[in-house]
Amino acid sequence: MPKALLYSTACLVASIACSTEPATDAAIETAADRPAAVSFSQGTDRIDVHLGGRPLTSFHYAATWDKPFLHPLRTSSGLVISRGYPVDPQPGEERDHEWHRGIWYGHGDVNGHDFWRELGRDKTGMIIPASEPTFRTEQGQGTLSAELGLQSEVGQRIGTLRQDYRFSTSDGAIVLDATIAIRADQGQSLRFGDTDDGGLAVRLADAFRQDHGAVLQNSEGQKDTENIWGQAARWVDYSTTMDGKRVGATMFDHPSNLRHPTRWHARGYSLYSANPFATGSFTGDKSNDGSHTVPEGETITFQYRMILYEGHKAPEQIERLYGQYANGDTE
């Protein structure tokens, strides 16, 4: 090779090496700061949700289940913070309430039918797909939607339940926005009776039990199930230590929801749900009836946000995040 060409090539290589080193560092830093993208894959009777190509959760809607649910629940590093039973039982964990699976929606008294407990299909109702659930992604976020029928224990469809779950990340935390819309579209009104068993619910791992050292608190500064169960609050937060990490799960009640701030079915055994229909049940005053009727042909809609996080979040930090949600922040 001519010397001039050798010299020119060497200079070009040196120039590239010198000019690309800082750019490479910047690219790495930008990639680290960029939220991981949400994606979906269709399985058999379930939809798997991924974050950055790794499993995040799955939406289960097989006919073997009496209602659909999201399970398991993971933090951004992949730590599972939901109870395994009955989907994936773990050694030594509690096995009460078989219908407590990840995140789900139900209510214990809709026109006298129980869509919360699962006591046998001849005794309690089912929430079943009316069509195949769908999913879509946009700008790194993902939305999963399901149209579901409220089917009584005698096989009659009495209404329609639509669930929309949007998955995103913010500051290293998983953000799950849920929209629950109930339509009285089957020729009858829907009366939601006053019972504490109902709402958008989550069942966490046993590490989130109060008797295992978890911290249970709400937006009103109250702590422990004895003080937060049945109380009205903008949010409820459970936090604990798992595998040496501080982790937590918070649920926000949107200001547009019926009877905001909602009351909470917040139990010490790692369960909580947002339930606006249980005023009498929660207060012990049966004259204070919390039932509500959705007239025939109308719809009632609820919005909630869950944040699954690692690290410590003080109440004032959670309140700041709640303010962003209440003011229309879409992240």
Image (tube, helix red, strand yellow):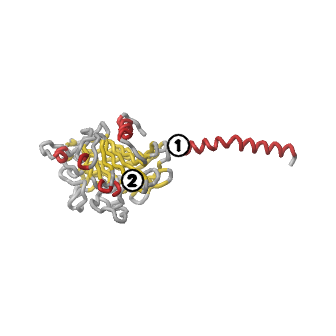
| 55 to the left or right of 294 | right
Residue 122 lies, with reference to residue 257, above or below; the image says below
Q: Secondary structure at mark 2?
A: strand
Residue 288, how many percent across, how many down?
14, 42
Residue 67, how many percent across, how many down?
30, 56
Task: Select label 2 or label 1 by which is in front.
Answer: 2
- Looking at the image, the residue that sits furthest to the top is 327
Kind of residue at badge 1: Asp
**Residue 236 placement: quadrant:** top left
Residue name at image x 35 percent, y 56 percent? 207
Residue 112 appears anywhere in the view: yes
Disc 2 marks which residue?
241
On-image quarter of the C terminus: top left
- Which residue is at the front of the view, 52 or 185? 52
Residue name at image x 47 percent, y 43 percent? 138
Disc 1 marks which residue?
33
Kind of residue at badge 2: Thr
- Which residue is at the front of the view, 1 or 139? 1
Residue 90, how many percent across, how many down?
37, 64
Q: 10 Å neighbourhood of mark 2: few (<14), some, or many (≥20)?
A: some
Q: 10 Å neighbourhood of mark 1: few (<14), some, or many (≥20)?
A: few
Sequence-wise, the earlier of marks 2 and 1 is 1
Residue 86, how many percent across, how many down?
33, 62
| Total residue callouts | 2
Q: Secondary structure at mark 1?
A: helix
